[in-house]
């Protein structure tokens, strides 16, 4: 009859430890059922679940492990695991797995306590906790610092909506972002990312900038804000705003384009996505003039936006062709997915306004970025505390896998 034991080592991390431990196990003919280790600040914690055959000298094995640990000033603990406990552990692998991603400028114990309390309340088990962000120096935080901890949890979750709502309540109270996803095959297999442009890839609403140049800023801003909150039909409000731009010199467009500020993390995100083989697109209710400007600067693969009518060097106040509204964005997203030969589950959509909700809802991963309250409440995921490159954390990529920011 075989026995099952859990062997745990802890102490200062040293070269060759895993090789030495597994060599002892191999010498006694044991089978490894599970193995894992973590190193935090040069301190190692390692666990090995082993199956010990009936003909193994358990006392000799224990003595060898104790001697090896003692020589390296480490601690070793050996405990028996009952067959029933092992069966329960094996049965657990069929339970659903989820990923909770905590995003903030700095991780605190209070944040971790509040998140894990929600996990515990729903009887979920934490399988793993990983820091995806880089190491943060002591003292004052660096400018635009990023901190991310990822929890892998497992268990039955009859009401995922209630669980998500409780997480969002914690996120709001602590001024952090908490993303909640099912851990499935699509998570690291996305292939296409579509972005809204205004207030997403750039930190401005271009039409408001043009309105300011045309001297109609207050009128247009009022209409823009109501439209982005979902209080007005986008197409109707868009035509009303564009009409107010009649007579604006074409040179004003170039001036606005030259001073557009790229959103925090956008260049790092898109550069990394392209390195990983992703395709990128702008699906915007703004203007193609500015989308082309961003396409050249960021290397965007596809752009779809509204064509501003210009005659004799002046804006006519009209749009050429149909308007890219919310429904059109969703239609374009489906078309791009078909053209690229990918499932919609492999698509990420990112936006901030009510007219982005249709494409956010059909994408495998829809992200409201620094969005209006209505959009945050309706979107599956939301990022408000960090820059756009925090999306890489939602895909499971740590800073060490992303390259320089």
Image (cartoon, helix red, strand yellow):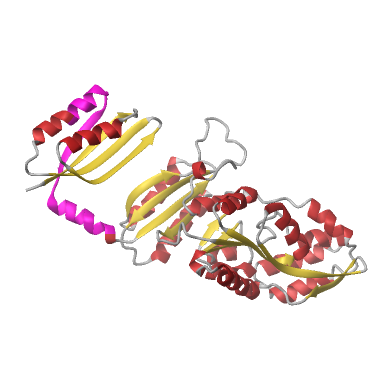
Q: Any magenta on residue 90?
A: yes
Between 224 and 44, the residue placed more toward the observer is: 44
Which quadrant of the view contains residue 56? top left
Looking at the magenta stretch, what is its main secondary structure?
Answer: helix
On screen, residue 40 above or below 233: above
Answer left or right for 339 relative to 68. right
Which of the image's four quarters has the C terminus? Answer: top right
Question: Which residue is located at x 15 percent, y 40 percent?
Answer: 29
Answer left or right for 129 relative to 401. left
Q: Is residue 372 visible?
A: no
Boundaries of the magenta span = 65-93
Question: Which residue is located at x 71 percent, y 57 percent?
Answer: 295
Q: x, y (%) of residue 101?
A: 46, 52
Q: Any magenta on residue 351?
A: no
Which quadrant of the view contains residue 124? bottom left
Furthest residue toward right: 312
Question: Which residue is located at x 48 percent, y 67 percent?
Answer: 345
């Amino acid at each position: 009859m075989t026995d099952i034991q859990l062997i745990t080592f802890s102490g200062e991390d040293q070269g060759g430890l895993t090789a030495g431990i597994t060599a002892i196990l191999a010498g006694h003919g044991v089978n490894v059922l599970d193995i894992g280790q973590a190193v935090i600040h040069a301190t190692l914690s390692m666990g090995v679940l082993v199956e010990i055959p009936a003909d193994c000298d358990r006392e000799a094995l224990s003595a060898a492990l104790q001697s090896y640990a003692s020589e390296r000033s480490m601690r070793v603990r050996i405990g028996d695991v009952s067959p029933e406990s092992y069966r329960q552990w094996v049965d657990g692998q069929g339970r659903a797995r989820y990923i909770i991603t905590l995003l903030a400028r700095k991780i605190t114990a209070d944040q971790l306590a509040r998140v894990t309390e929600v996990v515990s309340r729903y009887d979920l088990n934490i399988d793993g906790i990983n820091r995806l962000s880089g190491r943060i120096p002591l003292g004052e935080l660096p400018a635009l610092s990023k901190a991310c901890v990822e929890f892998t949890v497992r268990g039955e979750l009859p009401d995922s909506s209630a669980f998500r709502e409780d997480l969002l309540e914690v996120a709001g109270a602590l001024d952090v972002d908490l993303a909640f996803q099912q851990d499935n095959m699509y998570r690291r297999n996305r292939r296409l990312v579509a972005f809204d442009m205004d207030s997403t890839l750039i930190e401005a609403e271009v039409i408001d900038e043009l309105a300011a140049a045309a001297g109609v800023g207050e009128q247009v801003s009022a209409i823009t804000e109501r439209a982005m909150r979902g209080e007005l039909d986008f197409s109707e409000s868009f035509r009303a705003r564009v009409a107010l731009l009649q007579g604006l010199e074409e040179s004003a467009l170039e001036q606005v384009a030259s001073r557009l500020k790229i959103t925090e993390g956008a260049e790092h995100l898109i550069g990394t996505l392209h390195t990983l083989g992703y395709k990128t697109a702008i699906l915007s209710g703004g203007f193609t003039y500015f989308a082309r400007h961003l396409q050249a600067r960021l290397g965007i693969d596809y752009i779809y936006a509204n064509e501003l009518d210009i005659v004799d060097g002046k804006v006519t106040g009209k749009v050429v062709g149909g308007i890219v509204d919310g429904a059109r964005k969703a239609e374009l997203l489906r078309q791009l997915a078909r053209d690229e030969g990918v499932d919609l589950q492999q698509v990420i959509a990112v936006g901030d306004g009510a007219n982005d909700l249709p494409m956010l809802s059909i994408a495998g991963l829809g992200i409201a970025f620094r969005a209006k309250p209505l959009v945050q409440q309706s979107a599956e995921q939301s990022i408000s505390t960090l820059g756009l490159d925090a999306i890489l954390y939602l895909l499971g990529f740590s800073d060490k896998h992303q390259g320089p920011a």
